Amino acid sequence: MIAIDMHVHLSSPIEPSKSILEGSVRDYFRLDGAPDRVDEMAKKYKSWDMMGVLLAIDAETTTGEDPISNDYIAKVVSEYPEQFIGFAAIDPWKKEKSVNELKRAVNVLGLKGMKLHPVHQSFFPNDRQFYPLYEECAMLGVPIIFHSGMAATGAGLPGGGGLKLKYSAPIPGIDDVAADFPTISIIMAHPGWPWVDEQIAVALHKPNVFIDFSGWAPMYIPKTLIDEANSRLSEKILFGSDYPYISPDRWIAEWDDMPIKDSSRKNILLGNARKILGM
C-alpha cells in the first residue's frame, strides 16, 4: 500500500442523484457522466495500491435531502475491506439521535470516525449544544473530519445555494473544539482558503489537529501550506484526493513533482493516516 486517501466521497446508491447541491459540486469540478459504481471504485483503488476513507454528508435537517446511510457505508466497507475504511455521516442537528447514531455506527457497524460539514449543515463547530456529540467521540476514541475553508458545494447557485462559508473558519470553531476535547484527533479537510494562516496556526498549536490536502491539485495548494508540510507540519498533513472530484492517481502524480522531502512525503501519504486510524 503506497497511500491512504483520507477523503473519498461515496456516491449515492440511488442513481442518478437528484441532489441539486451535489450537482453544483460536480459542475464546480467539471465532472461529466455518471458517478463510478462501487465495484468500479474498488477496482481503481486496488489498481492504485491505496486504501480510501469513505465519507458522506448527512444534512437532512438543513437541506431536506436524504442522506447516504451509515448502513450503506458499512456495507461497502464489508464488501471491500482491503480497499475502504468508513466514517459515519452524522447530522448534528438531530441532537440525541445523532449521538445514538454515532454510537451505533462505531460499535455495531464498525465505522472508524465521524464526518461533519459545517457549511453544508449550517452550524458552528464550537456551539456547545453539539458538545455531547464530541463527548461521545472522545469516549469511542474516534477522529472527526470537519470541512474547512471555502466549499464547492453550492458554488455557482444563486446565493451559493443558501450555504454560508462563515461556519468553516478554523478559528474560533475548530480551534475551540480541539482545545475542549484534546483526546480527539481532529482533521481539517482541505486547504482552508481563505483562512490558510488560521489553519496552520491551529495545527501548530493543537497536537490533536491535522489537515488533509483534499480538493486541491498539489500545484494549486498555497505555498505556505507546502512549506509547512515540508517542515513543521510534516507529521500533521494527510493525503486526501476528494475523489471523484480529483482522481488520486492524478493527485499523486502531481505530488511527485512537488519539492517535498522524502521523510515528509512518506508521512503525508501513509504514516500520519496510519497513526490517526490506529493501523
Image: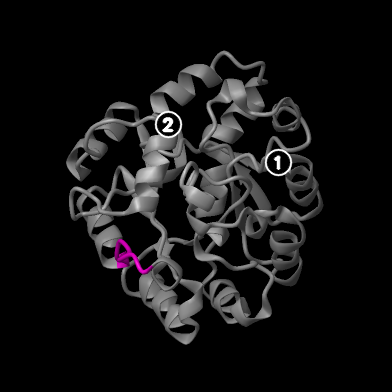
Q: Position of residue 177 (x, y in %)?
A: 70, 67
Q: Main secondary structure of the magenta part?
A: loop
Marks 1 & 2, CB-CB < 8 Å contact: no
Q: In percent of the image, x 48 and y 41: which residue is there?
A: 156
Vertical placement of residue 41 versus 254, above or below: below
What are the residue bounds of the magenta stretch?
64-70
Is residue 144 at least partly visible in the picture? no
Q: Is residue 146 left or right of residue 235?
A: left
Kind of residue indicated by mark 2: Ile
Outermost top residue: 257
Q: Is residue 180 left or right of residue 278?
A: right
Kind of residue indicated by mark 1: Pro
Q: Does label 1 or label 2 sit earlier along the sequence?
A: 1
Q: How many marks?
A: 2
Q: Nearer the viewer, mark 1 or mark 2?
A: 1
Vertical placement of residue 51 versus 166, above or below: above
Question: Nearest the camera: 130 or 59?
Answer: 59
| Residue 111 quadrant | bottom left
Q: In percent of the image, x 39 and y 32: which residue is there?
A: 1
**Mark on residue 194?**
1
Q: Position of residue 158 (x, y in %)?
A: 49, 49
Q: In percent of the image, x 38 and y 74: which residue is there?
A: 107
Name the residue tied to disc 2: 246
Outermost front residue: 158
Q: In percent of the image, x 25 and y 39: which residue is there?
A: 35
**Mark on residue 271?**
none
| Residue 174 quadrant | bottom right
Question: Helix, strand, or loop for circle 1?
Answer: loop
Is residue 16 at least partly visible in the picture? yes
